Image (cartoon, rainbow, N blue to C red):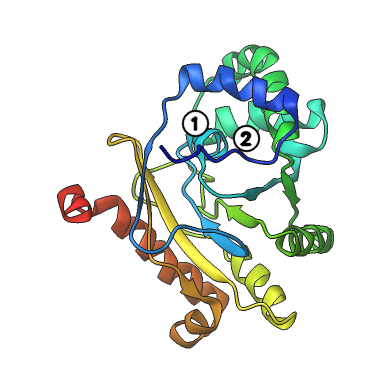
Amino acid sequence: MSKIFRQDRKLWFRGFKKLIKLRYRRPRYIYLGEKPTTNSIVLANHVGATGPLLLESYGEFPFRMWGTHEMNSGLKSLYNYQTKIYYHQKKGWNIHLARLFCLLASPLTYLFYKGLRLISTYRDARLKRTLKESVAVMKNGENIVIFPEMSDKGYFDELRGFYSGFGLLAETFFKRGMDVLIYTSYYRRKDKVHIFDKPIRYSELKKIATTREEMANYLLNKSNALGKMELPAITA
């Protein structure tokens, strides 16, 4: 029996994840190409909070996640983000119900993101911090997981769009002599299956899509195709 992979996390957080595993069962992982090992960018769909929870709990390769800085800037910031943006705006909850629920949910979420050592992302000049930390992670032999879907109006099985920040990150690595592999992946909630497409080198992606917006659309279509692929065809 092969040894179960374990992320490099602190002992207290490993215990915390055991509680998560009581609620979320291990998905089946399918790799259409090679499994991520080191120094790659992995794109995944969010499926609300399920995507990050499952990947952190059961992922089979070393990684650090990108995530909006509001999730990583203290409990008050997280509470405001979860009540107004995540539960009210994206999931359509009543704002009063969201505020009440987050009195419990936000402290637990704060522990989760603190434990997995989230890499904060920004939409201003502070993005340089994100890139700097990401470069350090790559030099440490890990991978970067990014959830690029546009979710302002909620989370959908058919992803509506990708933000192109991963392209900026890949270009940053490229200028430092690292031609990283990019994996597109998709978690199928109904089937409890997480599918990883064959990886593509950033240099090859640049030949197919010349701008970051074109790259985002190209990989968006790849991701949605994984969500529609017949499982018998995958496992045959």
Please tell me in which quadrant of the rendered image residue 157 appears.
top left
**Disc number placed over residue 55 in the picture, else none:** none
Please tell me in which quadrant of the rendered image residue 28 appears.
top left
From this view, report whether residue 74 is shown above or below residue 39: above
Q: Residue at x 31, y 56 (%)?
A: 226
As helix, strand or loop, the secondary structure at mark 1 comes to: loop
From this view, report whether residue 36 is shown above or below residue 107: below
- The answer to the question of whether label 2 and label 1 lie on touching residues, with beta carbons closer than 8 A, is no
Between discs 2 and 1, the one toward the N terminus: 2
Q: Amino acid at mark 2?
A: Ile
From this view, report whether residue 235 is shown above or below residue 48: below
Asked if residue 168 shows in the view, the reply is yes
Q: Residue at x 42, y 31 (%)?
A: 26
Asked if residue 160 shows in the view, the reply is no
Please tell me in which quadrant of the rendered image residue 34 appears.
bottom left
> What residue is disc 2 on?
85
Q: Nearer the viewer, residue 116 or 48?
A: 116
Left or right of 165 on screen, residue 226: left
Q: Nearer the viewer, residue 75 or 192?
A: 192
> What residue is disc 1 on?
91
Position of residue 206 measured from the top left corner of the image (x, y, whole percent): 52, 83
Q: Residue at x 79, y 32 (%)?
A: 77
As helix, strand or loop, the secondary structure at mark 2 comes to: helix
Mark 2 nearby-residue class (10 Å; few <14, some 14–19, many ≥20): some
Position of residue 202 measured from the top left corner of the image (x, y, whole percent): 55, 77
Q: Nearer the viewer, residue 3 or 223?
A: 3
Left or right of 12 on screen, residue 16: left
Left or right of 71 on screen, residue 23: left
Position of residue 154 measured from the top left corner of the image (x, y, whole percent): 47, 40
